[in-house]
Image (spheres, helix red, strand yellow):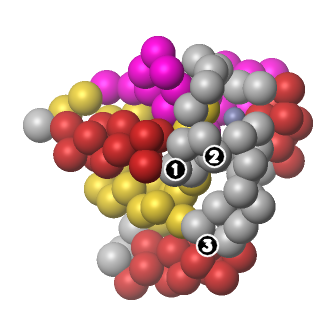
Amino acid sequence: MTDVRLRYDHIRLLDDELTIHAPNEACGVLIGMKEQSSIIVEIVLPIKNSRPSDRSFELDSKEHYEAWNRADEEGMEIVGVYHTHPHSKASPSAWDRQSMENYQTLWVIIGVDGINGFEWDGCVKPVEVVEVD
Ligand SMILES: [Zn+2]
């Protein structure tokens, strides 16, 4: 894929996630659909970080499961995950890179310098974040 489309309210929510949970990382999923080379996000759904840390995160398995059901009910799918970097830039840490290889989906990272998207395709590749109305 080449880009991910987020609305202004999504971006506001993601920015809030960064500050509300600091110094720990926050995490959640992105629900929406895939269209050709774009990912259209309809819902940004925060999920409890079941292993709070300022260096990594773990999606709470029960809430993650509920998110799959919610996406299914809405006729959509989980198209990606997000997490925050309250102390660093919006680029994958060594831990993130390993996790990306194991969970190959869109990864959105909210850092002190903004929001970036990535995917694993043999290596970490950037996915452009586009703000839409
Ligand atoms: Zn990270």
Main secondary structure of the magenta stretch: strand
Mark sitting on residue 36: none
Alpha carbon distance from label 3 to label 2: 19 Å
Q: Residue at x 76, y 61 (%)?
A: 51
Q: Position of residue 29 (x, y in %)?
A: 52, 57
**SS under mark 3:** helix
Q: Position of residue 75 (x, y in %)?
A: 36, 75
The residue indicated by pointer 3 is 64
Question: Are the residues tagged 1 and 3 within 8 Å (C-beta)?
Answer: no
Q: Residue at x 68, y 71 (%)?
A: 60
- Disc nearer the start of the sequence (1/3): 1
- Disc nearer the start of the sequence (3/2): 2
Mark sitting on residue 24: 2
Q: Residue at x 40, y 67 (%)?
A: 76
Alpha carbon distance from label 1 to label 2: 6 Å
**SS under mark 1:** loop
**SS under mark 2:** loop
Q: Position of residue 106 (x, y in %)?
A: 58, 41
Task: Establish whether ligand 1 lies closer than 8 Å to the Cβ of label 2.
Answer: no
On screen, residue 15 versus residue 37, left or right, reads left
Give the camera-side residue of 44 and 120. 44
Magenta span contains residue 125: yes
Q: Name the amino acid type tagged 3.
A: His
Mark sitting on residue 21: 1
On screen, residue 16 versus residue 95, left or right, reads left
Give the camera-side residue of 77 and 99. 99
Magenta span contains residue 98: no
Alpha carbon distance from label 1 to label 3: 18 Å
Q: Quadrant of residue 133?
A: top left
Badge 2: few (under 14), some or many (20 or more) residues near its Cα, within 10 Å?
many
